[in-house]
Amino acid sequence: MFETLSDRLDKVFTGLRGKGRLSDADIDATAREIRIALLEADVALPVVREFIAAVKDRARGSEVSQALNPAQQIIKIVNEELVGVLGGETRRIRYAKTSPTVIMLAGLQGAGKTTLAGKLGRWLKAQGHTPLLVACDLQRPNAVNQLSIVAGQAGVDVYAPQPGNGVGDPIAVARESIEHARRTMHDVVVVDTAGRLGIDAELMAQAAGIRDAVQPDETLFVVDAMIGQDAVTTAIAFQEGVGFSGVVLTKLDGDARGGAALSVRGVTGQPIMFASTGEKLVDFDVFHPERMASRILG
Ligand code: GDP
């Protein structure tokens, strides 16, 4: 991930290194190259525009033109702007004052929701919580089974539909799971929901129904970072259809160009909270904008 972008930016900065002072023309040429690097990395156009405007604006100010080492100054500006685009501060889960905290997962099929439920379960348990994973993906025949498997691997409990317990009705299962969590002293409920291959009205209505039933403290939009520009369109559709408070990027281990990571915050205004970097439950961590920016800049 990000190799191409890192390489491109590195070349831009290398070209600047020999220079003493930077003219406006130098700054414009640099900005143009950074723009191309971002567009090639699949970053959404409005995000690129804003990014370049900010870099240019700051680079033309005294902090660069007066600097003895302009390349260093430009790198510093790009780094700070990247951190900003990635969300600035690390955004932690906001736990409810009264248990259970409800975290709902939403996203397309194959985005990695069920895997994420296991990862979150394991992570929450390591933080001292007693999570309950709830199977509300009743569309995909194997999803309930898959959730039970990841819950077993994570060593956490699972709530799945039982006969007479809302079989086939994910909204009823979701509602009952909260009652169950209260009775059984689970302090965080992670609700896995169904996703379709494409965005459709029925999927959105079902996810919105689950949302209304469980009143989540956090709704996490789970998105495969490999889908490029589609990540942005999908994010907008979920924001309108269900709403969400945070984003989880999955498959960051792939060799995609990384545009989703750099666009989704700017386009939706919601922070990236976690990142998934593989199929195993340990391949998961809190998303740190500063660390990600440093990784991109190498
Ligand atoms: P869901 O349909 O949204 O519940 O998606 P799943 O959790 O079933 O994941 C779909 C596929 O993606 C599975 O084969 C997972 O093993 C895989 N997967 C999930 N997260 C990651 C990740 O971060 N990296 C990689 N490489 N694969 C992942």
Image (cartoon, grey):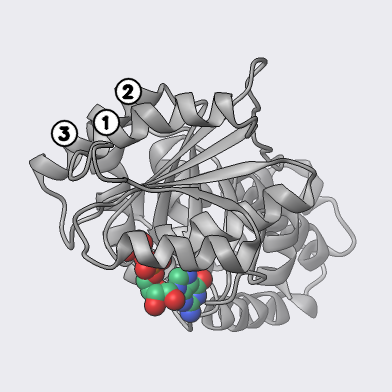
Q: Residue furthest left?
A: 201
Note whether 24 is above or below 101 in the view shown. Answer: below
Q: CA distance from mark 3 to mark 2?
A: 12 Å
Crowd tier of the residue under label 2, counting other residues whose Cα lies within 10 Å: few below 14, some 14–19, many 20 or above: some
Give percent across and percent down for residue 231: 33, 58
Neighbour tally class for label 3: few under 14, some 14-19, many 20 plus, Cα within 10 Å: few
Q: Quadrant of residue 281?
A: bottom right
Q: Can you see residue 151?
A: yes
Q: Which residue is mark 3?
A: 205
Residue on which the image places disc 1: 172
Name the front one of labels 3 and 2.
2
Q: Disc 3 marks which amino acid?
A: Ala
Where ligand 1 lies, by image quadrant? bottom left
Mark 2 / mark 1, whichever is N-terminal: 1
Q: Which mark is residue 213?
A: 2
Determine the image quadrant of residue 48: bottom left
Closer mark to the observer between disc 2 and disc 1: 1
